[in-house]
Image: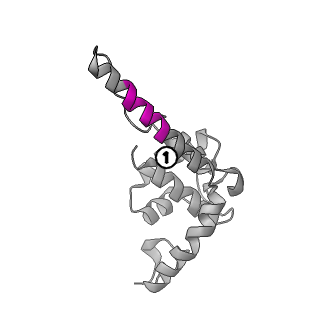
Amino acid sequence: MNIDLALGLHVLGFLTARRGSPLTSETLADSFGTNPVVVRRVLGKLKEAGLVLSRRGAGGGSVLARDASEITLRDVYLAVAERPELLRRHPGEADGAAQVLAGYINRIYDEAEDALLARLQSVTIEQMDAEVRPEICAALARRGLDSAAPASQRAS
């Protein structure tokens, strides 16, 4: 798994907090500390999965395509994952002991993935936002930052 899940969750959390006001890839990138091209790549995956709507040009940006209560963390994972399996499987191509071990390890991996995906399915973006937004706002306030403004526009 790469950074796409964390970035996808960040994007959807930020869009949830904005309550329908579009955000540009530049603002989202600034808030995550990455390049807008990286954000646009993830936004493309989220759009393809029906999680965000994006509009180009002046006044454009991205918004949630559905209510945050209808989007689970698993939806985001499946939208951005390059491969649906979280753990690389033991190839099990050899005979004997290697094949037995491969079967054993792969069953454990399957169980671990099922547990993680079930947990991701049990949390919505709305729930995530409700839990983390107060902490984010408090952290920004302690640093003297306005949580609504991009980092490049905040008071230092």
- Label tally: 1
* Type of amino acid at the residue the image marks with label 1: Val
Q: Position of residue 62 (x, y in %)?
A: 60, 54
**Image quarter of the C terminus:** bottom left
**Front-most of residues 58 and 146:** 146
- The main secondary structure of the magenta stretch is helix
Reading the image, the residue beneath label 1 is 42
Q: Which residues are magenta?
A: 103-112
The residue sitting at 44% across, 83% down in the picture is 155
Task: Identify the residue shown where x is 46% and y is 76%.
Answer: 153
Residue 125 visible in the current orientation: yes
Magenta highlight on residue 110 = yes
Q: On the rendered image, what quadrant is the N terminus found in?
A: top left
The reply to whether residue 83 is in sight is no
Magenta span includes 84: no
Camera-nearest residue between 108 and 9: 108
Drawn side of residue 140 relative to residue 60, left or right: left
Instruction: Give the residue drawn at x 51%, y 74%.
Output: 136
**Picture coordinates of residue 143, whole percent (x, y):** 42, 83
Binning the other alpha carbons within 10 Å of mark 1 as few (below 14), some (14 to 19) or many (20 upward) gives many
